[in-house]
Amino acid sequence: MPTTIKAYGAEFSDAPLKELEIKRRELNPKDVKIKIEYCGVCHSDIHTVRNDWGGSKYPVVPCHEIIGTVEAIGDDVKDFKVGQTVGVGCMVDSCRTCPSCQDDLEQYCEQGSVGTYNGNDKHLGGHTFGGYSQQIVVDEHFVLNIPENLDIKATAPLLCAGITTWSPLSHWNVKRGDKVGVVGLGGLGHMGIKFANALGAHVVMITRSKDKAQDAKDLGAHEVLISTDDKQMQEHANSFDFLLNTIPVKHDMNPYLGLLKRDKTMVLVGAIEPLEPLHGASLILNRKRVAGSLIGGIKETQEMLDFCGKHNITCDVEMINIQNINEAYDRVTSSDVKYRFVIDMESLK
Ligand code: ZN
Ligand code: ZN
């Protein structure tokens, strides 16, 4: 019998989030039942609630940055034990057999990975519900170990913002001595700076706003480049080994491409929407590349978490109660958070 539990969600696209009830499945042999402790608030949650990308299924119970404690395990679970602190990120299932799944890249599953919320629930039918709830049941393959030395409240956003920025830095082999630009300072950008710094790169924060300079340096940027200052942009032309572009909205990529060295790459992780036209010369003249990257696979997410444990890296967070979620969404929409809200799920009693 599925269990009925309390959750928080939205019943239609312009409704405020409120308390409601959802069902979680009984434990299958490979399942882990997790009592939810902390939930990070990602911009994708808001896009889904508001149906900005179309196709949202209601009620939407968001959150794919989940930290909790293992409450029970199925008979065949090998890697987790009751009482352990664990995480769940953006996916709770995939086909496990396609070439992408075989390569530990479940996020690019050819059948489509199952989102932690608003995915197709293979067990109960209907759609999946995310972390704004008392508990969640997840196949152990999609459960992550959280290093014990980290402040667990501040690890929640690693499960989406962390892996989204880690995966491209790792895939494009950013290394000690590289000059790396992080474009945009929000939830994603602040993690990009921390990771690139810990990898030994020379990190340049690229932003339109002078106001963000001191914060960027505090997070680990070695330099700040104001992208609206033509003279500064000229001084840095053709000098970067890698650009991580975290801007979440439509923008002009051409000025940033001018910053790359020959044969180097700018990776988009934020803007899932049409962009301003790209001038062919921005790519052709020095054989430059634009690429994209989506979250990361489960194996890579564990590698990221282990790296965070080793280097003591967490997110900068502001704690809230679930009852303040609607106000928090308004503040995320106006970029008024440093750098991620995390919900203390004790507040959902
Ligand atoms: Zn997210
Ligand atoms: Zn697959």
Image (cartoon, helix red, strand yellow):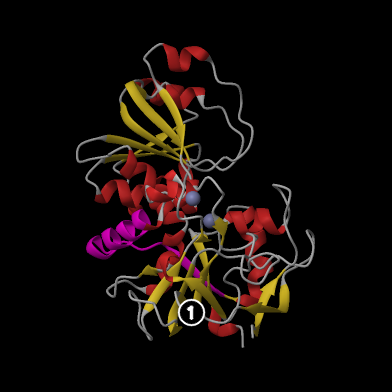
Q: Quadrant of residue 206?
A: top left
Q: Is residue 73 above or below residue 44?
A: below
Tell me where residue 345 appears, x and y as whole percent.
55, 79
| Image quarter of the N terminus | bottom right
Residue at 49% over, 75% down: 38
Residue at 48% over, 79% down: 34
Q: Quadrant of residue 234?
A: top left
What range of the chain is rendered magenta?
299-320
Q: Quadrant of residue 238?
A: top left
Residue at 73% over, 60% down: 57
Residue 33 highlighted magenta (yes or no):
no
Tell me where residue 275 appears, x and y as whole percent.
61, 30
Quick one: SS at disc 1?
strand
Tell me where residue 120 appears, x and y as whole percent.
64, 60
Tell me where residue 173 appears, x and y as whole percent.
27, 39
The residue wearing badge 1 is: 34
Question: Which is more toward the observer, 189 or 134?
Answer: 134
Q: Please, what is the three-letter code of the amino acid marked with disc 1? A: Ile
Q: Is residue 274 left or right of residue 265?
A: right
